């Protein structure tokens, strides 16, 4: 590796650090606005849509789907039905995987 002053410097992208409070507010914003895409909300907040998606997934896996403040009973019902459907799909996938691996070990 050339250490002369004329050698090109490796550029490292500075990684942004966000507080847990900021991440929680961002997740709540996503949950309160189901009509907006992650990309739209990420642009509004000035964050990567991948980071925002990761925060949402982590929040949902740690806490389940959290009711946003001011959620109406109709919105809550819709959100919970969606969560139940997702959980059913996950259960079916796990059942199929368990069956597959059980057959593979025989």
Image (cartoon, helix red, strand yellow):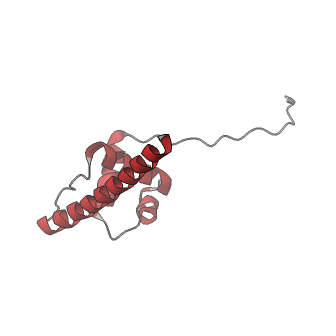
Q: Is residue 48 left or right of residue 23?
A: right
* Residue 33 x/y as whole percent: 30, 65
Residue 47 position (above or below residue 38)? above
Can residue 25 be seen here?
A: yes
* Residue 22 x/y as whole percent: 35, 46
Give the residue at the far bottom of this rendering.
35
- Which picture quadrant has residue 62? top left
Give the residue at the far left of this rendering.
73
- Which picture quadrant has residue 13? top right
Q: Is residue 89 left or right of residue 75?
A: right
Q: Residue at x 85, y 30 (%)?
A: 1
Q: Is residue 6 left or right of residue 57?
A: right
* Residue 57 x/y as whole percent: 38, 50
Give 24 or 3, whichever is nearer the viewer.
24
* Residue 39 x/y as whole percent: 46, 63
Q: Residue at x 82, y 40 (%)?
A: 8
- Which picture quadrant has residue 82? bottom left
Can residue 55 be seen here?
A: no
All told, the count of numbered labels is 0
Give the residue at the far front of this rendering.
106
Residue 96 position (above or below residue 38)? above
Residue 23 position (above or below residue 84)? above
Q: Residue at x 21, y 67 (%)?
A: 78
Q: Residue at x 39, y 55 (%)?
A: 93
Give 21 or 49, whichever is nearer the viewer.
49
Give 51 or 60, whichever is nearer the viewer.
60
């Amino acid at each position: 590796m050339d250490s002369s002053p004329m050698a090109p410097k490796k550029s490292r992208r500075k990684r942004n650090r966000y507080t847990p409070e900021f991440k929680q507010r961002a997740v709540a914003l996503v949950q309160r606005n189901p009509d907006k895409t992650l990309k739209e909300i990420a642009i509004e907040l000035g964050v990567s849509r991948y980071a925002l998606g990761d925060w949402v997934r982590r929040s949902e896996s740690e806490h389940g789907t959290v009711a946003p403040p001011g959620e109406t009973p109709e919105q809550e019902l819709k959100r919970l039905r969606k969560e139940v459907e997702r959980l059913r799909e996950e259960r079916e996938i796990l059942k199929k995987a368990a069956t597959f691996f059980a057959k593979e070990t025989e």
